[in-house]
Amino acid sequence: MVSGVSEENHFEDESLKQFKEISENDDHQRNVGTLNFIGGKFKGTHFPLKSMFPEFRFLDEPEDTLVVKNQPATLKCSAVGPRPPKIRWKRNGEFLQFPDFNDRRRLQSDGSLYFSTIYHKRSSQPDEGLYQCVASVDGLGTIVSRMASLQVS
């Protein structure tokens, strides 16, 4: 077991000391706790660190994608949190609005971005660009995926 004392508090009564401790068990589960040294004896409580910091992370992030014009495409994104995260997408730094003006782009239930048809002309490339997935959970915060390029061949 790996452990370390991160903070030590001393009180006027020298028989009482308090230590905050983070430890890791053999299964690499981290625990946090308080050890109280009272009258020559340690008394403490420990609980999993995960209970203090709930899991909030991406399961899938978008990847650079090369697509053929007039074909469908999907940029993957899914996240997990203590409550279902709200997924939004950015293209070239600007949030996309759903439903799309012509319904070609759709936000799927898992958070992925689906294009029914990739549109591309010399004068207009509304689908090409740099995309990011943004997941948020109220009261917990926001995470932003890696940036992925969508290019049309």
Image: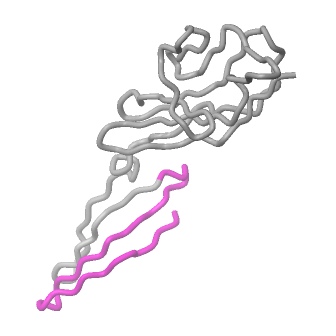
Residue 30 to residue 110: above or below: below
Position of residue 97 in the picture relative to residue 32 (left or right):
right
Find residue 46 and report its image quarter: bottom left
Seen at 52% across and 13% down, the residue is 101
Position of residue 141 in the picture relative to residue 38 (left or right):
right
Between residues 43 and 100, which one lies in front from this camera angle? Answer: 100
Residue 68 to residue 8: above or below: above
Residue 72 to residue 138: above or below: above
Rendered-image quadrant of the C terminus: top right
Seen at 74% across and 29% down, the residue is 150
Name the colour scheme: one colour
Our reading of the magenta stretch's main secondary structure is strand
Find residue 5 and report its horizontal and vertical position in percent: 40, 75
Find residue 9 and report its horizontal and vertical position in percent: 25, 82
Between residues 83 and 72, which one lies in front from this camera angle? Answer: 72
User: As drawn, which residue projects farthest toward the front?
Assistant: 123
Seen at 51% across and 33% down, the residue is 95
In the rendered image, residue 21 lying in the magenta stretch gets the answer yes
User: As drawn, which residue projects farthest toward the left?
Assistant: 13
Seen at 35% across and 30% down, the residue is 83
Q: Magenta part of the protein: which range? A: 1-29
**How many circles with numbers are drawn on the protein?**
0
In the rendered image, residue 153 lying in the magenta stretch gets the answer no
Find residue 105 and report its horizontal and vertical position in percent: 59, 15
Residue 92 to residue 71: above or below: below
Find residue 123 and report its horizontal and vertical position in percent: 77, 22
